[in-house]
Image (spheres, rainbow, N blue to C red):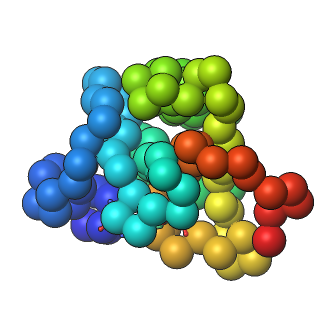
């Protein structure tokens, strides 16, 4: 069982911000911004690159959850960034699909 699957099953504790039938959102243990939340599907998927057309609804749920997290944590007016890191060159370190929700400060572009 992977690290994030253990967070889903509560074998590893996390600071949960939002939970639905399909997704879990929790604070990143090493925040890169004042708000840094990870939105993950409860069902294991390695990365966006492992997704198939049948995962479209699940991916949509993740994006709606990201929006709800941003609202809940007061980012609606100031803005925020959502990021998928996919594979080695993007620096993906946990091989369970996750969406970063980052906010609370101005973001640089392009990302490093
Ligand atoms: P990636 O680099 O794969 O895109 O992002 C993985 C993220 O998971 C990192 O930002 C890292 O800080 C976070 N992370 C790694 N292990 C844990 C953990 O045990 N708990 C929480 N809440 N976040 C974690
Ligand atoms: Zn997993």
**Would you identify the image quadrant in which residue 50 lies?**
bottom right
Q: Position of residue 20 (x, y in %)?
A: 31, 24
| Residue 75 in view, yes or no | yes
- 87 horizontally vs 94: left or right: right
- 55 horizontally vs 16: left or right: right
Q: Position of residue 22 (x, y in %)?
A: 36, 29
Q: Position of residue 43 (x, y in %)?
A: 36, 44
The residue located at (45%, 62%) in the rendering is: 31
The residue located at (25%, 42%) in the rendering is: 16
The residue located at (15%, 58%) in the rendering is: 13
**Would you identify the image quadrant in which residue 110 lies?**
bottom right
Q: Quadrant of the C terminus?
A: bottom right
| Residue 61 in view, yes or no | no
Q: Residue furthest left?
A: 11
**Which of the two residues, 44 or 101, is positioned nearer the viewer here?**
101
- 73 horizontally vs 20: left or right: right
Q: Position of residue 57 (x, y in %)?
A: 55, 23
The residue located at (75%, 77%) in the rendering is: 89
**Would you identify the image quadrant in which residue 76 lies?**
top right
**Which of the two residues, 112 or 60, is positioned nearer the viewer here?**
112
Number of numbered callouts drawn: 0
Q: Residue furthest right?
A: 110
The vertical placement of 88 against 72, above or below, is: below
**Which of the two residues, 55 or 97, is positioned nearer the viewer here?**
97
Q: Quadrant of the N terminus?
A: bottom left
């Amino acid at each position: 069982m992977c690290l994030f699957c253990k967070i889903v099953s509560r074998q590893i504790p996390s600071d949960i911000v939002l939970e639905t039938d399909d997704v879990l959102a929790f604070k990143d243990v090493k925040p890169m911004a004042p708000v840094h939340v990870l939105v993950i599907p409860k069902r294991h998927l390695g990365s966006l690159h492992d997704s198939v057309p049948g995962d479209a609804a699940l991916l949509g749920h993740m994006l709606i959850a990201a929006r709800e997290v941003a609202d809940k944590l007061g980012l609606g007016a100031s803005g925020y960034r959502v990021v998928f890191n996919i594979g080695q060159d993007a620096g993906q370190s946990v091989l369970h699909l996750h969406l970063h929700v980052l906010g609370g400060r101005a973001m640089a572009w392009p990302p490093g």
